[in-house]
Image (cartoon, rainbow, N blue to C red):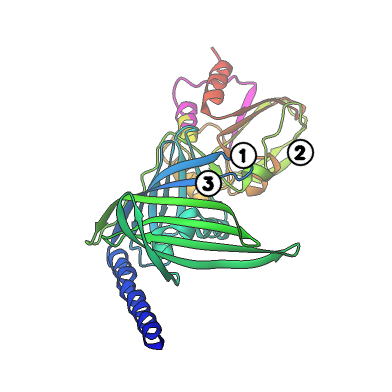
């Protein structure tokens, strides 16, 4: 009997060790490639309502062996670019480019993204234990597990397990994140990976951002909001990009247009082209001040180089953007002679018609 048990135990060890090459071959396949492209379909169930949230994204990872790998993603409405430690999200529905104002915030967000947490290249760098062979869509897959965490809350044990399923061609086909409360299964999040492409040659990708989209910063969306109509402006002083002093006072002879722009914003460029055109002839009783608060003076100067600029241009004044609640570009305030905002306009679709209505005949 002991011999039979010893034989079965030895057979089990041999069987388990025979599965290790599947995991190792998968690692070699991903990490020896210079480019890995695939589709992710994720399923997030709600245990209370039985509803399931689903999303699909196409990813392309460049040099996946690197911890801080560069990537591109695309779904139905948006794209992501991460290259040279710069991240951009393009929302085509809103026609807006989002980026982070602070690099630490950007790096934290990228590190905690679903791709960096649950992407195949991240999963393969974890330690795994072989469980069994299982069928997925009629094909055998090697099943591995990993205990992600064990914690306690209100005298209850909460355990989170990761499970991966490696196909016969050494790609991760499925990932599961299972949560247990006192041993009872709660939520299971499932990721399916398919449409894999592996490319061995060294390749780079270009960041191609739309030229006619607005620019917004993630950090400002919750903390800053444009000032509303009937808000009194706080006086300020500045020096324009040509070194001339400028003073905004609450009691002046002329009305003011405070236009907040960015050199990296496509919608700002649309407005800039118009106010520099021969068709823009502003009423003499109105003065235009164009503020590039997050741009340096050299960049703002270069933006208007060799242009006939007949209005005040300010730059490098993030404090003014904070004061005026600027969370994206372009934003225009129409201010009366007493320093009171009479109009707040956001985006070129609002600003352009308004500017046209103010031009002198």
Real-space Cα separation, disc 1 to disc 2, in angstroms: 50 Å
Real-space Cα separation, disc 2 to disc 3, in angstroms: 48 Å
Residue at point 53%, 46% (across, down): 44
In the rendered image, which residue does mark 3 sit on? 44
- Residue furthest bottom in the image: 2
Magenta region: 271-291
Q: Quadrant of residue 198?
A: bottom left
Residue 172 in sight in this render: yes
Residue at point 62%, 68% (across, down): 150
Q: Quadrant of residue 208?
A: top left
Q: Where is 145 relative to 250, above or below?
A: below
Real-space Cα separation, disc 3 to disc 1, in angstroms: 12 Å
Closer to the camera, 247 or 8? 8
Q: Secondary structure at mark 2?
A: loop
Residue at point 58%, 49% (across, down): 316
Q: Secondary structure at mark 3?
A: strand
Q: Secondary structure at mark 1?
A: loop
Mark number, residue 213? none
In the rendered image, which residue does mark 1 sit on? 49
Nearest to N terminus: mark 3 or mark 1: 3
The C terminus appears in which quarter of the rendering?
A: top right
Residue 122 locus on image (x, y percent): 43, 63
Nearest to N terminus: mark 2 or mark 3: 3
- Categorize mark 3 by other alpha carbons within 10 Å: few (<14), some (14-19), many (20+): some
Q: Quadrant of residue 166?
A: bottom left
């Amino acid at each position: 009997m002991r011999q039979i048990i010893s034989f079965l135990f030895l057979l089990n060890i041999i069987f388990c060790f025979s599965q290790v090459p599947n995991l190792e071959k998968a690692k070699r396949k991903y990490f020896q490639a210079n480019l890995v492209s695939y589709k992710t379909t994720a399923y997030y169930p709600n245990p209370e309502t039985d509803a399931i949230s689903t999303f699909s994204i196409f990813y392309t990872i460049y040099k996946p062996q690197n911890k801080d790998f560069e990537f591109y993603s695309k779904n139905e409405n948006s794209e992501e670019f991460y290259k040279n430690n710069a991240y951009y999200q393009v929302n085509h529905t809103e026609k807006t480019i989002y980026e982070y104002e602070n690099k630490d915030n950007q790096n934290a967000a990228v590190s905690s993204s679903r791709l960096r947490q649950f992407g195949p290249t991240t999963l393969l760098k974890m330690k795994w234990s072989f469980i069994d062979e299982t069928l997925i869509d009629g094909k055998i897959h090697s099943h591995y597990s990993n205990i992600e965490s064990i914690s306690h809350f209100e005298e209850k044990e909460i355990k989170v397990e990761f499970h991966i399923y490696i196909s016969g061609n050494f790609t991760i086909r499925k990932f599961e994140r299972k949560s247990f409360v006192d041993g009872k299964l709660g939520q299971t999040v499932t990721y399916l990976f398919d449409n894999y492409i592996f490319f061995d040659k060294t390749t780079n990708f270009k960041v191609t951002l739309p030229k006619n989209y607005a620019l917004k910063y993630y950090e400002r969306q919750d903390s800053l909001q444009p000032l509303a109509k009937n808000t009194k402006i706080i006086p300020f002083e500045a020096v324009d990009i040509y070194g001339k002093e400028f003073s905004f006072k609450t009691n002046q002879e002329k009305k003011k247009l405070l236009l907040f722009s960015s050199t990296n914003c496509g919608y700002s460029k649309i407005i800039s082209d118009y106010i520099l055109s021969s068709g823009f002839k502003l009423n003499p009783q109105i003065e235009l001040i164009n503020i590039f608060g997050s741009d340096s003076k050299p960049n703002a100067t270069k933006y208007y180089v060799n242009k006939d600029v007949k209005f005040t241009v300010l730059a490098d004044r993030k404090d003014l953007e904070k004061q005026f609640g600027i969370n994206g570009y372009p934003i225009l305030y129409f201010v009366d002679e007493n320093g009171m905002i009479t109009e707040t306009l956001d985006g070129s679709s609002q600003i352009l018609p308004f500017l046209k209505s103010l031009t002198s005949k």
